[in-house]
Amino acid sequence: MAQKLDMRRVKTALRRKMAQTAEPAKPAMQLGFVHHNVDCIGCRACEIACKDKNGLPPGPRLRRVMAVEGGTYPDVFAYKVNLSCNHCADPACLPTCPTGAIWKRENDGIVDIDSTLCIGCRRCEAACPYGAPQWNAKEGIVQKCNLCVDEIDAGRKPYCVMACMMRVLDIGPIDKILAGKHPTTAIGPHDKPVRQVKNMADPDLTRPSIAFVPHRKGKVE
Amino acid sequence: MKTPIADLLNPERRSFLKTAAAGAALAGGGLLELEDARAHAYAPYLTDNQLTAVVTSCDHNCGSRHMLVAHKKGDVIVRLSTDDGRYQAGGAYGKDTPGEPQLRACLRGRSYRTRIYSPERLLAPMLRVGERGEGKFKRVSWDEALDHIAHKMVWLKRKYGPTAILDQAYAGASFGVLHKSDQIEGLLARFLGMFGCRTSSWSVPSYQGTTFSSRITFGTITDGNEDDAFAHSKLIVMWGWNPAYTFHGGNTCYYMRLAKQRGCTFVVVDPQYTDSAAAYDAWWIPIRPNTDAAMLAGMAHHIFANHLQDQPFIDRFVQGMDAGTMPGWATGQESFKDYILGMSDRTPKTPEWAERICGVAAADIRKLADLYARTKPAALKASWAPGRAAHGEQYSRMAAALQAMTGNIGVLGGCAEGVGKGWHPVSVAHPHDENANLWWASIKSDRWAHCVLNYPDVKREEIGCWPRNDALDGQIPNIRAIFWHGSDWFNQLTNINKGIEAIKKLELVVCSDSTITPSALWADVLLPAATHFERHDVGLPWYKGHYYIHRPKVIAPLGEAKTDFQIYTELAYRLEALDPGLKDFGKRYNPRAGRDYFQSPDAVDEAYLAAWWKKVQDQQGVKMSWEEFKRRGVYKFIFDQPLVAFRAQIEKGEKFETPSGKIEIFSTTLARVADWTRTQYGAPIPAIPKWIEPFEWIGHGKAGKYPFHLVTPHPRWRTHSMFHNLPWLRETYQQEVTINAADARRLKIETGDIVEVWNGRGRIVVPAYVTERCMPGVAVVHEGAWMDLDKRGTDRAGNPDFLTKDEPSPAGAFAYNTVLVNLKKTALEHHPGWDVRATSRSIIFRRDA
């Protein structure tokens, strides 16, 4: 947790938050993730790469590969849903932050969080329908995926994407991905990406920047 | 500070944003108006561009080998990344083609930083002060530790002779070209051999049954295609194979994804609906453990009965498939087809016969046999796991028979694996000569405890004594000491309780490792070994893939750690001073080094490696200089077509390396054995593959008392026992027993309930994972958990090797998957070994929709 808040910086941050709460940043191009729910082998190299990149202790998992299974023996199915932060068009976390630590980047729509301003109140954690903000008990702060902004700004892709052994996780302009107009190895030649899979919050709530290639049992009608 | 390697290789460092693959609108920076927006989320924070990048690789005994890039500040590794296409010759950020794919590390490799800096890291030499196994040690100097060992070794050899020290090295410390901790021919083997006192352990825990089968059938274990060949199959039958857990071969799963996109059909034969089955949307055929050979025989029957076999292929390349291909000297003996059709035992191995044994419906056996025989090319990938069983070699040989009768050998998209070793690297930079594998006795690896406990009343066939041509042939070794080098075998071999009884009888146990393993707690002397980040070496593909990865000394050794090569060299010098028979031992053991090697190894290691690279250049036509290789960090070979095993035999008519020069389904070697007790096998092995009933399985009488068949597969989140102590990985799983939902309902067990699993050999306590994805009557506990005994000898951590039996198959296959157990909800305590409550564990979501 921030030991001593610089009130001057908090003030500036809060001004930004008020502005972005009234009207969320509308980036010319919104970056987002795409993940293939079936072809993912669930290895979690992305998760560990993320832990390492962000120097995380046990506890917070900024990226989470969730294993979904169902059916009755021997007619069973299983697939993976891989989520971190969806860098929503209307982030639910942002307005909840009392110190303005969360903001949305104007250029690419990444929702970033400034740990030097975080007081560990965990309101964002409660607000997010996707479990993106993660509690770091050791530091007393909330952390979340910032799409490796330093890598993005250096012209590279985030650690999780570059870790994917199956090449089923990628980033790109989310509109183009959903329209099938962004070339990516995450989507196979016969696959069609969707905005939502089963058991996932209604995307109209926060308009998440995420696309999935769903399992046949994971499709939302 | 910029990234020097990146700048060097990619001076303009084109951002991926400017390349064709990505949009142009991502350009970063500049748009954030508030000054504090510069603050990063996780302060203090160093970006990759502020760190020094050093290419290296992972280095454990898993199934693949991938690139790791250490990003460091001073002498500290801040984080690891992996191959991003920049480092190879002609590389660029993002380059990733099927011909030259990126070597992306798995979750285990990515966790290495926490392993180097883990609290379990062994940082100084230690001497035991308490009882053996009590885990009480005192810190001592290197001088004291090495002198203690040297004196004891000389005394042991004098008192008990040349078999007193058991070599239990394993590949846990290194799979490099210079610092090799190998079971048969590693640094320790040569050291003990030259010292003149060594009992060797010849059977390999992971795949001895398969190794035997490949050698008997094809005359070689190089029966593997390279992983890119999988992309060309039209049908892949994954028999007991779960590469989504083992990552067998650097990019195997990725190439199989390409096959899937091209319309390949996948079948998984396994007691579990694995993640591999899920990812490839496979037809899942659940099978009773240890009955694989029976099902394969049923398939063979269907193929013969319907004349679906590739008879021209059989006639030309195979010995003993049928009466027509039997060698002249064996006329009248049973051929494989005779056996399958029941000519001699009057039991045709029909799909119905197989169904009664393996539990797979005869209709499904027929359907799969049909599919396999009619789809060309088709890969029957017969994994090692079903072979880790009593008579496991019979399953591997039966699979080879199926591969041969359908003509899927030596063709792109087919598969002759077996062991599956593909491309062969130039693998040895360390001194390697006639002393590489000297031994005075060599036994089946899992029989050491039996040998120690019963010496001298042991028969050679009980421990699988490897024959010798001298007076020592068949002599029972008098084992009085064990050396572990990169080996956690005490935790990993079968029937640990018997091992605990035996180890108390020994007079010296030495453990050289970088981590304080569960085995280490049973040692007398602990020697801190440097990790591969702390010494100079080159990484090799473990199994598939064709590349070399340079491994510089990324950081200085932590604490007082030394490399294993330094340790054994220094010990050799100390021994030569004690034993006049060991003249120049130090110099002969490590010819390029002097006595100062213990203090400064860098120049010597560099000389060994440079000489090795010269061999690579000469033998493999590599043009890249050693200096450039070191600068880039990786050399990737590019082949004009995927490497396919036995292509030369099939296309050019070259001979197989068997006695007959053919694929031997009827084995010349086995058919000619007169006295099995004098072989390393100790018991008869039929000349053709047959289903032989294991000593325990669901169909056995013992199943009344112990109704569950336990299998102990390789986990994803550990390599055997390595990485078990790392919290990042512990978050992704739980050491648990997997059982079928209907079984669980009957026993009133729910997911998360603490369960005890037991049989006559031991008892473990673990949480349950209840799922429809597991076959009824089967229990699954992944191998490698670090044992944690309570006062009554119950393992609270859940190491399944307290339940396995130290009774190997004749060919030496470990019976890791031949285990009957019972289980029930319990009040006994489970120790996960780390703070589960402090973390957000992985969750499996049950969704019935």
Image (tube, helix red, strand yellow):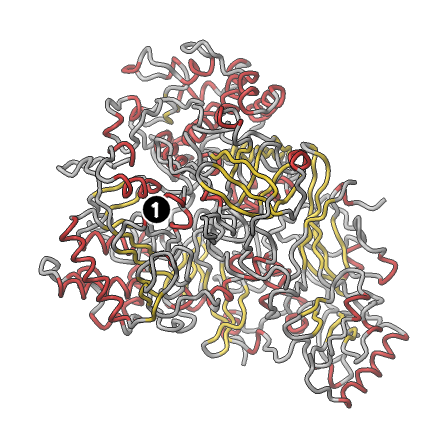
**Quadrant in the picture for the N terminus of chain B:** bottom right
Give the amino acid type for the residue marked by disc 1 in the picture. Answer: Glu
Indicate the position of residue B594 as horizontal and vertical percent values.
Answer: 20, 69
Image quadrant in which you'd find residue B692: top left
Q: Outermost residue, left direction? A: B580
- Residue under label 1: B501
Q: Going by the image, does B691 lie left or right of A143?
A: left
Q: Residues within 10 Å of mark 1 (few under 14, many from 20)?
A: few
Q: Is residue B317 visible?
A: yes
**Number of dots carrying numbers:** 1
In x, y percent, where is residue B673? 26, 24
Q: Secondary structure at mark 1?
A: helix
Taking the view exactly as shown, the residue that stands out farthest to the right is A22
Q: Label 1 is found on which chain of the structure? A: B
Q: Nearer the viewer, residue B722 or B223?
A: B722
Residue at (38%, 73%) from the top-left corner?
A: B559
Q: On the image, which quarter does residue B657 sit in?
A: top left
- Residue A201 higher or lower than B695, as above or below: below
